[in-house]
Amino acid sequence: MTLAFMPLSLALMLLVTNASITSPGAAKEQRGEQRMWAKVGDPVVLPCHLSPQELQSSWKQLYEKTAVRWERHGESSHKEPHMVLEVEYSGLLKTARSMMPRASVRETSFRQGDFSLWIEPLLNDDAGHYEALVRYGKETRRCQLELGMVTVTVNPPGLLVETEPLLLLCNSSHPAKLVGMRWFHNGSLVPVSGRFRSRYGDGALSISRPTVSDSGPWRCELTYSNNEKVSATFNLQILGFAGPASPVVYAAVGSATNLPCLLNRDPSASGILGVSAHWSRLAGEDLEIRGISRNGSNGSFTLHLPEVGPGDAGQYCCAVSIHGTTITRDVTLAVMTVTPSTKGPVAEGSRLLLICSLTHPRGHELFQWRQLSSGLSNGSSFEATPRSPGVQRYYLGSTLELTHVSQEDIGTWECSVHGSEGRLGAVEYELYITGAQLSGPHPILDGQVSFGLILVLFLLLVASILALVLRNQRIFSPAFPALERVVTAPTSGNAGKDEGQEGKSLQTEC
């Protein structure tokens, strides 16, 4: 016979079969004794219920008064029984002090012919022989079963830290001799080799250097000399790092980045305090301490780098100390840079190479170039217009070659790195062209505008000269035009002067 422990479900409820009735009112019993196994600490249901045929013939009596009494004989049916739980006809409930409040029945299920005993949680002392006596109407029902215990424990107890050796112990109250044991992790059989060692004598499995991947359900299967198998499951929790074993962070030169150091669970939530971490980096032959933190938020000890330079690339180590045990995680920082083939200004029409380089490559990275925005002129002003994904230009490879640089190439270019896990990182490069009129029209139009401007200036100069000449003529011309007609007669002596003056006066009056 093979019996395996399962979590609380209907599969645990064993249908109790009945012997033939020899006389009215005789107690109905099952054929043979039922045996079931349960794990200490889990809830369990000890089944006792009527078969569908009995329920159909006795449903009227079930609506009358019903009394149920559960007793336990300890680990042997020959021991003196003691009451576990009793429901009298009046509905009064009695429970043994050792079973309070763990033992219960569902009185609402009595009318459906279900008198099962519920125990939650199950203790090691609950193992033994159980018997239920049910009285309803003139009928009496008796259920008997043997409850065996299976225990799975871990040593050391509590939350385990990665790399700490541990021991899984699995045993049961089965009286027969243990002849075989197997362990399963996440449903797969664990080979007893390498880090795993099995001990048949005490049903133990030792794990040296456990990792976070060892977390999860572990099921032990015990085989006894009577060919009976017993199994139980234990959920193993191991505190360690979350994420890949050796992460690589890709960052553009000049950008800010974070180096992750995250635990798979918050130690403080499990009552573990005093956790500290420090970062270090091997710079040349010196070990450089980059940061120390204590009791990281939610188990996070991330190192922030405000501005990444080529000299920051390399391998960093995050060491976390938990209760005297130190676990480490190596993080590699790969810095991305773009190097142009032409140093200094780039002339329009020239050939240009943009080389995207990566420190500490892993060998499987793929590079891709694309133009994020175009710097073409728009009217009289320069605009960096983002390109829609449908019209963006893509180029594969780490080197971008522009054979004839034009104004269409002006703008932002992005070099991105991709791997099997997707996009890893990216770096941007701004491309400018020397002599390109980023804020004016086309060069041909530039000449036309210049000629027109010179012509206007020349006309303004000519007009200024003419205006100046006319102004000077007005300044030096007489104020009274009539004086231009005065005639001076030649005279001699004083008489001549007087006559001249008189002549002038006469001329002026005329």
Image: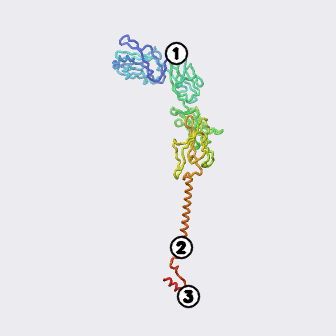
The x, y position of residue 433, in whole percent, is 59, 49
Does residue 434 appear to the left or right of 27 in the view shown?
right
Q: Which residue of the protein is positioned furthest toward the right in this rendering?
A: 285
The x, y position of residue 475, in whole percent, is 53, 73
Classed neighbour count for the residue bearing mark 1: other residues with Cα under 10 Å, few (<14), some (14–19), many (≥20): some
Sequence-wise, the earlier of marks 2 and 1 is 1
Choose top left, top right, bottom left or bottom right for residue 464. Answer: bottom right
Is 372 located above or below residue 111 in the figure? below
Choose top left, top right, bottom left or bottom right for residue 328. Answer: top right
User: What amino acid type is highlighted by mark number 2?
Assistant: Ile
Residue at (41% x, 14% y) in the render? 18
Sequence-wise, the earlier of marks 1 and 3 is 1
User: What amino acid type is highlighted by mark number 1?
Assistant: Asn
- Local secondary structure at mark 3: helix
The x, y position of residue 200, in whole percent, is 56, 19
Is 23 located above or below residue 321 in the figure? above
Classed neighbour count for the residue bearing mark 2: other residues with Cα under 10 Å, few (<14), some (14–19), many (≥20): few
- Please name the residue that numbered disc 1 is placed on: 227
C-beta proximity under 8 Å, tags 2 and 3: no
- Please name the residue that numbered disc 2 is placed on: 475
- Please name the residue that numbered disc 3 is placed on: 496
How many angstroms separate mark 2 from mark 1 (CA)? 139 Å
Of tags 2 and 1, the one toward the viewer is 2
User: What amino acid type is highlighted by mark number 3?
Assistant: Gly
